[in-house]
Image (cartoon, helix red, strand yellow):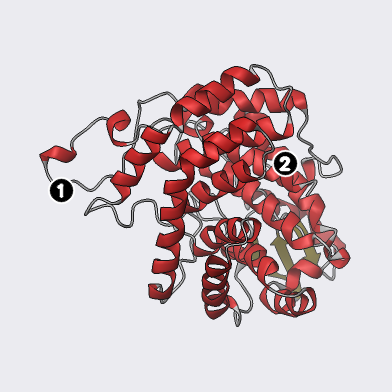
Amino acid sequence: MSSKKVISLKVIKYKFSIHSSNGVIFINCKMKKYISILVLVIILGCNKTKEGHQIATSEIKQDIVPILNLEQANKLANLPLHCINTEYPNRLSQTLGGDEDLKSPTQLHPAFYGCFDWHSSVHGHWSLVSLLKSFPEIDNADAIKHKLLNNISKENIEAEVAYFDGKHNKSYERTYGWAWLLKLAEELHTWDDKTARQLETNLQPLTDLIVEKYIEFLPKLNYPMRVGTHSNTAFGLSFAYDYAKTLHNETLKKAIKERALYFFKNDEDCPMLWEPSGSDFLSPCLEEAALMKRLLLIEDYKVWLNDFLPQLKAKKYSLEVGVVSDRTDGHLVHLDGVNFSRAWSLNKITKDLPDYNHLKSIANQHINYSLPSIFDDSYEGGHWLGSFAIYALNSTTD
């Protein structure tokens, strides 16, 4: 069913009302003999996918908690391994200052040229680091480490820094790519391995530059970006805050907290019914709620969350998954991403809040809908969705 549909019929002075909200159908009527008429309306009101099949959230497994194990880790590792050294196709998102800027991806971004675009390459590298850290016995571990060391070399990172220092590149990858770069740096810092120490040292100049860019940029940002794609402010601040907290960077923490509270502290009644948009891969409402969970004391957060998304507290709350009609379409497949990002946000929200534990089943549904599809996915989804799946799966056990 559509996310919200209200139909009223008057038949011989009797009023009938059908209301569908998040896949749950409510029928109010005074005479049962007219139910057949109502059922017809329900059928005609259904939304169909491209293949003509109705997807019901209730049909997706919610009682099975998806867990990242070694078998799955090996499958997920193949996704970034397939693309971190694949130069083309490539979307540079580049501003040209002259003919001298017309260079190949490997020349412009010798560390992060693969996986179609810069940010996907960065979080593809994060995926491999995360999997190696959690599963040292993963297949081809030594070969993966060699690839990481070859790509994230001292010389390659110096070239990446030089690109960001270019006249026309000051806002390059702001803030989505910045956020993933800091997530990569955080993952390296928390991985107890000699390879990680070398990689962290090599990456440090770019890490420091991104931290500086955040601190410089945030006071200038007067209005947050409340979208479901790359420039979402809440997502960019969440990953940056995780890095700052882990690395004890008090200056960055302070800059993020001050701006986030300025943007979001007084928000109320976020319109979840507007989500998702057609090519969202982030949930504006849930990303904001997950960010504020990081920043507020638990009692303050409960008050804020009740004002911001009061419906989440209802034990029967449901949320339809983002349905993907064509996984060969680079924008439509974004909705697999929204399912994973909703899951990690919901799991963040529920932590230490037992009154919201029912939301974990919704997170499970969203992961279980999208996870089976990404392994044999086309390159449009395969070049980036593995990272989202890993982060979502990790959130089920955090």
**Residue located 63% across and 79% down the image:** 268
- Direction bottom: furthest residue: 266
In terms of image quadrants, where is residue 162?
A: top left
How many numbered marks have been drawn onto this rendered protein structure?
A: 2
Residue 271, image x and y in percent? 60, 70
Please, what is the three-letter code of the amino acid marked with disc 2? Leu
Q: Residues within 10 Å of mark 2 (few under 14, many from 20)?
A: many
Q: Left or right of 180: which side holds 70?
A: right
Indicate whether 253 appears above or below 90: below
Badge 2 vs badge 1, beta-carbon distance below 8 Å: no
Is residue 181 shown to the viewer in this render? yes
Residue 262, image x and y in percent? 53, 80
Residue 381, image x and y in percent? 51, 34
**Residue located 42% across and 47% down the image:** 206
**Residue located 70% across and 74% down the image:** 296
Of 64 and 115, nearer the camera is: 115
Residue 225, image x and y in percent? 45, 66
Q: Left or right of 272: which side holds 59?
A: right
Numbered badge on residue 7: none
Is residue 52 shown to the viewer in this render? no
Please, what is the three-letter code of the amino acid marked with disc 1? Gly
Between marks 2 and 1 in the image, the one whose residue lies nearer the viewer: 1
Numbered badge on residue 393: 2
Q: Disc 2 and disc 1: Cα gap in Å?
A: 42 Å
Residue wearing tag 1: 97
Of 367 and 215, nearer the camera is: 215
The kind of secondary structure element at disc 1 is: loop
Q: Left or right of 351: which side holds 211?
A: left
